[in-house]
Image (cartoon, coloured by chain):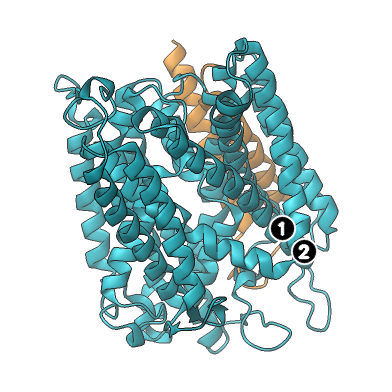
Chain colours: A cyan, B orange
């Protein structure tokens, strides 16, 4: 590991051994795609894995699909910015929702035999509700995938000196080849490998950085207490660095946003729906909750240790700065790698970063092709074609998805502000949807018109809130009527408002429209669906006891880092 | 492909083995803050063991 002179020390220098790890990994993911290809003979094999994947694999894929490169870089950055309160994104903002989807929602998703989340909406409600969800989801997936590709290209340009075009095209080409060969199965199998690689590639960084900072006692000695507690300073927005109070944190992040994401985003739900049985589908998010609880120690802790190292005398680490002043938190992860990993391990660390990017992108692409093929093409463009035609469309859509993502990545380089704006919008798109699902799954009176208008007004309500409020200079494009203490508070409030609007409008419209007859709601709604009990399975395979164990572990980590 | 543990096991065993050998051959390869730890050696060993465990589980299941 050498450093370029004069302030260019954010550059990493790779040796042949580092490239070797990267090359071995690339060959491996392509090989998995090729092996998975042999299983594909129908559109459902390609797009949904036809309920064939063992539960340990779906569980790890369930969290890996969400562990994109932006998540890795962003969580390390937030660790440095906010401290251990960032773990709320996992402990409060993911695990409870994962328990909920496994315990209460999966029986309807899996039992309905829907092939996608929008298709469930079609079965439960009607065509227009499905259409609205399918189109917003398809657009969002492509842009998210493009934005993360853009972020990766920029990062590699900055720290490795690779050309933006080359890294974007190479990584996209590899994802394209393996998703095109093996479809969802190959994406899911690779996500498991990516998960292991992320843990094995980043956990040593966490251990080395914390050890260097003097362990937990060292962190305590060098950091303000506000960075080392999850709840203690959460009561008032002005006491904690996130600028949110406990109500918004719990209602916005812990309820609306996390349930909106983990319970209704097809990207993750698709992984559980690929499981080989109803029991497996329900266990998927529950089993995934265990590694999820411990991920903050791998992805957030290095960022916290980085700040302690900076404050120590002789810590040997400086936070990377932006050209115009202020810390550039997005570079914390890569600068830490430069300080702690020699050539060799550096290659593994970069491979892990590349793996996280690929898992995120493959997740988007495989969700996009399913929703487009079944919920847009088969529903609106060509209804009764032979299955081989849909398999072909699925493959073409995979290519189109990757090409469109690349186009978005380039769009992002030209129109940075639009991308900023879209990310603000995507942050609340799933929020109203959770109200639709909650009512749709647990109240059989809920009508199709109620669901559609609730969803639409919820989205509009969220958009208006964004248009009327400002935080950290963002939003307020209609009129800056209200200022939030932080962008996070703004984001949480928008989600809460969008959710409430959707809930109220759905109930109101439902009460004046005619519900579907009960005979059409079997396996779709609570009360007219047989919930499997699996009383003869061992306790660790039953959802209830598994969830109790998850809750106990969750309470313990929350108490430790109170 | 019926058992993902096998290819995954081979991948990590291979990456771990390369890193371990590299750590043994070039103990002078160091990062600025590694505090005298041979990072390559220990990380390579960990990955090799992880890969080995996956392979062991996979082959054991076949018997």
**Quarter occupied by the C terminus of chain A:** bottom left
From this view, report whether residue A467 is shown above or below residue A236: above
Please tell me the numbered disc located at residue A248: none
- Subunit bearing disc 2: A
User: Do discs 2 and 1 share a chain?
Assistant: yes
Residue under the image location 46 percent in, 26 percent down: A115
Q: Nearer the viewer, residue A3 or A154?
A: A154
Q: Residue A204, can we see it?
A: no
Point out residue A12 in the picture as x, y percentages from the top left corner.
Answer: 76, 65
Identify the residue shown where x is 47% and y is 55%: A429
Quarter the N terminus of chain A occupies: bottom right
Name the side, left or right, on which A288 lies relative to A4.
Answer: left
Residue A413 tag number: 2
Q: Earlier in the sequence, mark 2 or mark 1?
A: 1
* Residue A203: percent from left, percent from top: 50, 56
Above or below for B52 versus A65: above
- From the top left corner, tell me how far across and down residue B51 is, in percent: 54, 34
Q: How many marks?
A: 2
Q: Given contact means CB atoms under 8 Å apart, are the residues at marks 2 and 1 in contact?
A: yes
Does residue A239 lie above or below B16 as drawn?
below
């Amino acid at each position: 590991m050498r450093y370029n002179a004069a302030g260019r020390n954010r550059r990493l220098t790779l040796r042949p051994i580092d490239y070797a790890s990267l090359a071995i990994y690339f060959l491996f993911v392509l090989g998995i795609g090729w092996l998975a290809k042999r299983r594909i003979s129908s559109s459902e094999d390609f797009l949904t894995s036809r309920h064939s994947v063992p539960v340990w694999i779906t569980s790890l894929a369930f969290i890996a699909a969400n562990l994109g490169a932006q998540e890795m870089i962003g969580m390390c950055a937030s660790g440095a910015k906010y401290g251990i309160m960032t773990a709320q994104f996992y402990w409060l903002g993911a695990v409870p929702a994962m328990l909920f989807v496994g315990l209460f929602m999966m029986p309807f998703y899996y039992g309905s035999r829907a092939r996608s989340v929008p298709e469930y909406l079609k079965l439960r409600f009607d065509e227009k509700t499905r259409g609205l969800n399918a189109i917003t989801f398809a657009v969002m997936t492509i842009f998210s995938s493009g934005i993360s590709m853009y972020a990766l290209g920029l990062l590699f340009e900055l720290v490795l000196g690779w050309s933006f075009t080359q890294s974007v095209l190479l990584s996209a080409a590899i994802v394209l080849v393996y998703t095109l060969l093996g479809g969802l199965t190959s994406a899911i199998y690779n996500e498991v490998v990516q998960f292991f690689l992320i843990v094995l590639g980043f956990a040593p960084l966490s251990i080395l950085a914390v050890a260097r900072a003097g362990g937990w006692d060292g962190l305590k000695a060098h950091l303000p207490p506000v960075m080392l507690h999850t709840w203690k300073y959460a009561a008032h927005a002005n006491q904690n660095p996130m600028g949110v109070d406990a109500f918004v944190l719990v209602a916005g992040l812990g309820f609306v946003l996390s349930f909106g994401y983990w319970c209704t985003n097809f990207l993750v739900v698709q992984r559980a729906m690929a499981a080989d049985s109803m029991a497996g589908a329900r266990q998927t998010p529950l089993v995934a909750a265990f590694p999820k609880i411990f991920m903050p120690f791998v992805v957030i802790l290095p960022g916290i240790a980085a700040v302690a190292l900076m404050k120590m005398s002789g810590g040997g680490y400086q936070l990377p700065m932006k050209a115009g002043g202020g810390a550039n938190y997005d570079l914390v992860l890569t600068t830490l790698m430069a300080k702690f990993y020699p050539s060799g391990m550096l290659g593994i660390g970069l491979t892990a970063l590349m793996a996280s990017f690929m898992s995120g992108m493959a997740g988007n692409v495989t969700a996009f092709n399913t929703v487009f093929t079944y919920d847009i093409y088969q529903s609106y463009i060509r209804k009764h074609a032979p299955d081989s035609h849909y398999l072909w469309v699925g493959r073409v859509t995979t290519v189109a998805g990757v090409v469109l993502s690349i186009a978005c990545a380039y769009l992002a380089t030209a129109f940075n502000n639009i991308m900023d704006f879209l990310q603000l919008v995507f942050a609340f798109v799933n929020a109203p949807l959770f109200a639709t699902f909650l009512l749709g799954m647990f109240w059989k009176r809920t009508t199709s018109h109620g669901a559609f208008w609730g969803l639409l007004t919820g989205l509009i309500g969220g958009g208006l809130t964004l248009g009327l409020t400002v935080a950290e200079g963002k939003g307020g494009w209609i009129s800056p009527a209200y200022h939030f203490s932080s962008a996070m508070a703004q984001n949480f409030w928008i989600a809460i408002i969008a959710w409430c609007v959707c809930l109220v409008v759905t109930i109101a419209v439902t009460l004046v429209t005619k519900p579907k007859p009960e005979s059409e709601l079997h396996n779709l709604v609570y009360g007219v669906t047989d919930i499997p009990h699996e009383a003869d399975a061992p306790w660790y395979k039953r959802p209830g006891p598994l969830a109790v164990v998850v809750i106990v572990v969750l309470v313990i980590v929350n108490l430790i880092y109170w | 492909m019926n058992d993902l543990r096998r290819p995954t096991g081979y991948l990590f065993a291979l990456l771990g083995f390369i890193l371990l050998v590299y750590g043994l051959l070039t103990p002078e390869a160091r990062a600025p803050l590694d505090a005298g730890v041979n990072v390559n050696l220990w990380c390579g060993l960990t990955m090799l063991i992880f890969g080995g465990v996956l392979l062991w589980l996979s082959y054991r299941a076949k018997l």
